[in-house]
Image: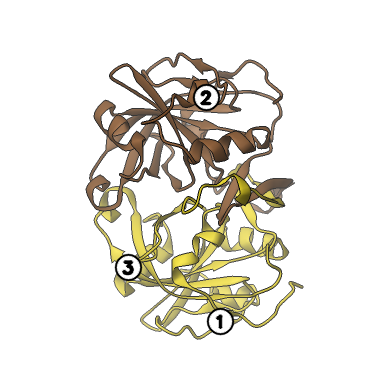
Chain colours: A brown, B yellow
């Protein structure tokens, strides 16, 4: 069981706090009455405001057409409590199975998009497609985060980071280096 | 002191092992007789082969023009032993200081590019600019990794991951989930 408390609104321009450290995330999508989930490790923050995130969603994934056609998704942040579920989501296709049902995940309504939030995740970022200029060449989608929902505790959830070949790293200790930063540089 | 052993050639199509977990990296550049370093947290793997990495290098950085004009850089992976140096590199400008000299870092010759490797880093990835289509709009550079040099030990170096506001996360424990993967899905 993961430690769940109610999520709160979180400023979209601050989502780098959760995405910049490089965790594996789960992408939920919805199109023509069907929902889906995929595991994603190739993403980067691109801008604070508008809050932009760039992601690779391979055209080999069932989610590719759903995200492209709907122009929406939710980026959900799982903790290590969901490790096996994260792997299993990445090892089956939404063409064959409803992954929410198969993995006993709670689909919660989002505020701005039709794609569902994952109740069991620590944070959920509602995204609208902002720029598809590199989708053809690189499967690279640029999304704007239009709403963010985050559990306030724990302050630093234990996240999963993928190294390839079946190996994951967990997030570890936190260090505060504010004193070494110049004003405005953090 | 960091634990240093000689680096070995590493397959460029496998650099996701080091970059996909989302560490802070140091970007070295060289242009018109001058070298520079910057700290970078916004990057993602884009493709295995060719080995492509997408990175945000803000036009506010002294490195921006050097990387764009030379079409080259090296992405270096520091460990937590270099934490204070990483922060200090991000808090001064190459317009004012030679950061290799200021922070006592060893500039080593690369094989394919003029930008130097950082001897003290665990891994160094030589990069050539592959696509600048999104540089104007997003400061987003797509590089091809053309050579990779990695210390074989430790197998899982302790890396730094930035959360913003002066707070870093260290990499933590390693878990092997190979048994849950389908063939070809790792």
Q: Nearer the viewer, residue B181 or A180?
A: B181
Specify whether B114 is left or right of B152: left
| In this view, the mark in front (1 or 2) | 2
Question: Judging from the image, what secondary structure is the residue with disc 1 in?
Answer: strand
Measured Cα–Cα span from mark 3 to mark 1: 21 Å
Vertical comparison of B159 with A21: above or below: below
The residue that label 3 is drawn on is: B129
Measured Cα–Cα span from mark 1 to mark 2: 52 Å
Vertical comparison of B144 with B168: above or below: below
Vertical comparison of B89 with A95: above or below: below
Q: Nearer the viewer, residue A119 or B143?
A: A119
The residue that label 1 is drawn on is: B107
Residue B7 visible at all = yes
Query: Could you say where residue A59 lies in the image, as x and y percent from the top left?
Result: 30, 44
Vertical comparison of B113 with A142: above or below: below
The residue that label 2 is drawn on is: A102
Same chain for the residues at labels 3 and 2, yes or no?
no
């Amino acid at each position: 069981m993961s430690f769940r408390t109610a999520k709160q609104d979180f400023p979209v321009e601050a989502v780098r706090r959760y995405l910049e450290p490089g965790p594996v995330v789960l992408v939920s999508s919805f199109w023509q009455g069907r929902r889906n989930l995929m595991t994603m490790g190739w993403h980067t923050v691109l801008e604070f405001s508008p809050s932009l995130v760039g992601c690779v969603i391979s055209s080999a994934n069932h989610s590719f057409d759903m995200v492209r056609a709907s122009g929406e998704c939710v980026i959900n942040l799982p903790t290590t409590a969901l490790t096996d579920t994260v792997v299993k989501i990445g090892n089956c296709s939404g063409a064959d199975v409803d992954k929410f049902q198969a993995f006993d995940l709670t689909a919660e309504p989002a505020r701005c998009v039709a794609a569902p939030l994952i109740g069991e995740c620590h944070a959920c970022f509602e995204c609208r497609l902002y720029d598809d200029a590199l989708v053809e060449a690189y499967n690279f989608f640029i999304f704007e985060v239009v709403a963010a929902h985050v559990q306030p505790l724990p302050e630093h959830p234990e996240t999963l980071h993928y190294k390839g070949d079946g190996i994951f790293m967990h997030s570890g200790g936190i260090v505060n280096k504010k004193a070494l930063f110049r004003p405005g540089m953090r």
